[in-house]
């Protein structure tokens, strides 16, 4: 049994990381400042002696948390449109916040420091997927702030010997995601009989690679325990256009699917993302426990129950 510090523990991905760690019989310190996207209710069913919640904003220096074996720095502000409206909040959370967590790990040495990044640091994908060592070209304050966090992590590995890994992940779906995100947003609109907006560029619909959030949690934990310092694309998923995803959600609900294509109306929005896993060691090519379709069905029905 190891002791993990998980930042952003009350958020969508964070709560699934905590859940998986407890399932694997680890001890967990879950740190969060409980923003709109990370309510305490997400942790309501995760109780017991092996889990301790710490209310703290990591844009401030971290308190003494006691010895920790591994850090999964998952906490971040993560919405492109909100970053366009308030860039400073994203820089404070994703750059200054990362600095503070790294400084804490420097004072209280850990076995491994995992920084959870995103495919969006590369900017829009072309015909070929991005590889781990490709140049970062972020296009909005959110992705730029996540890239800034990556550079800090690399610098602390080289300058101070922090045993750090960077993981880049793809679009995720699953329970407990904020309703502003695509899958729960589509579920809500279909249940209300509303038209679903599908963003397009010159009439063409963008695509994403999709993975279930619980599968990412398993990959992150494995990397923390077994990975070597470096950069990893945790990117095994299923590629779907936004229109295809919305149609699948409608089919699961048995709902009438009315949609309209809406041209992108804001800057800094990337048409598509794509990551290569060719350079990633085989041990992070995890296999989904269930099929994409079954996991999406499970997710959609969870939101249907919550929103009904």
Image: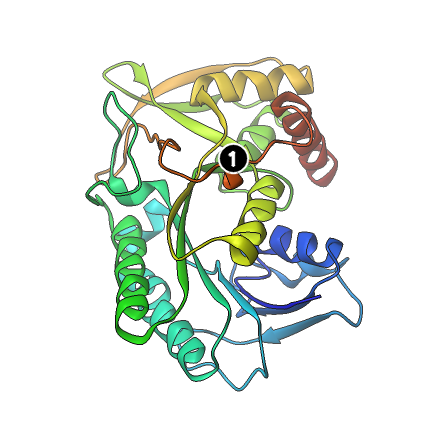
Whether residue 41 sits left or right of residue 280 in the image: it is: right
Q: Quadrant of residue 205?
A: top left
> Quadrant location of the C terminus?
top right
> Quadrant location of the N terminus?
bottom right
Secondary structure under tag 1 reads loop
**283 versus 159 height, above or below:** above
Q: Residue at x 48, y 58 (%)?
A: 74
Viewer-proximal residue among 152 and 263: 152
Viewer-proximal residue among 147 and 180: 147
Q: Position of residue 27 (x, y in %)?
A: 69, 68
Q: Residue at x 40, y 45 (%)?
A: 232
Q: Quadrant of residue 131?
A: top left
Q: Position of residue 73 (x, y in %)?
A: 47, 62
Q: Residue at x 61, y 13 (%)?
A: 256
Query: Dot 1: few (<14), some (14–19), or many (≥20) neighbours within 10 Å?
Result: some
**35 versus 106 height, above or below:** above
Q: Visible in this render: residue 64?
A: yes
Q: Residue at x 46, y 20 (%)?
A: 240
Q: What residue would you read off at disc 1?
A: 285
Q: Visible in this render: residue 13?
A: no
Q: Position of residue 179 (x, y in %)?
A: 55, 42
Q: Quadrant of residue 262?
A: top left
Viewer-proximal residue among 94 and 131: 131
Q: Position of residue 235 (x, y in %)?
A: 45, 35
């Amino acid at each position: 049994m190891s002791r993990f510090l998980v930042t952003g523990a009350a958020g969508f991905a964070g709560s699934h990381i905590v859940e998986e760690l407890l399932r694997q019989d680890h001890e967990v310190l879950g740190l969060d400042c409980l923003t709109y996207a990370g309510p305490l209710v997400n942790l309501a069913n995760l109780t017991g002696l092996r889990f301790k919640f710490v209310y703290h904003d990591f844009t401030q220096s971290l308190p003494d948390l006691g010895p920790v074996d591994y850090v999964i720095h998952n906490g971040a502000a993560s919405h492109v449109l909100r970053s366009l409206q308030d860039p400073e909040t994203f820089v404070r959370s994703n750059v200054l916040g990362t600095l503070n967590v790294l400084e804490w790990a420097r004072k209280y040495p850990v076995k491994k420091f995992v920084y959870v990044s995103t495919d969006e640091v590369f900017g829009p994908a072309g015909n070929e997927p991005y590889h781990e060592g490709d140049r970062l070209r972020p296009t909005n304050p959110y992705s730029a702030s996540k890239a800034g966090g990556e550079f800090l992590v690399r610098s602390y590995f080289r300058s101070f010997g922090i045993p750090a890994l960077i993981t880049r992940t793809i679009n995720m779906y699953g329970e407990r995601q904020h309703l502003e995100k695509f899958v729960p947003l589509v579920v809500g609109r279909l249940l209300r009989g509303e038209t679903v907006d599908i963003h397009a560029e010159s009439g063409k619909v963008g695509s994403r690679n999709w993975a279930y959030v619980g599968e990412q949690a398993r990959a992150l934990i494995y990397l923390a325990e077994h990975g070597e310092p470096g950069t990893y694309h945790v990117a095994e998923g299923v590629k779907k256009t936004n229109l295809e995803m919305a149609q699948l959600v409608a089919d699961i609900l048995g709902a009438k699917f009315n949609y309209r294509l809406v041209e992108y109306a804001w800057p800094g929005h990337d048409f598509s993302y794509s990551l290569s896993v060719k350079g990633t060691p085989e041990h992070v090519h995890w296999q989904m426990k269930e099929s994409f379709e079954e996991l999406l069905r499970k997710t959609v029905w969870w939101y249907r129950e919550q929103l009904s």
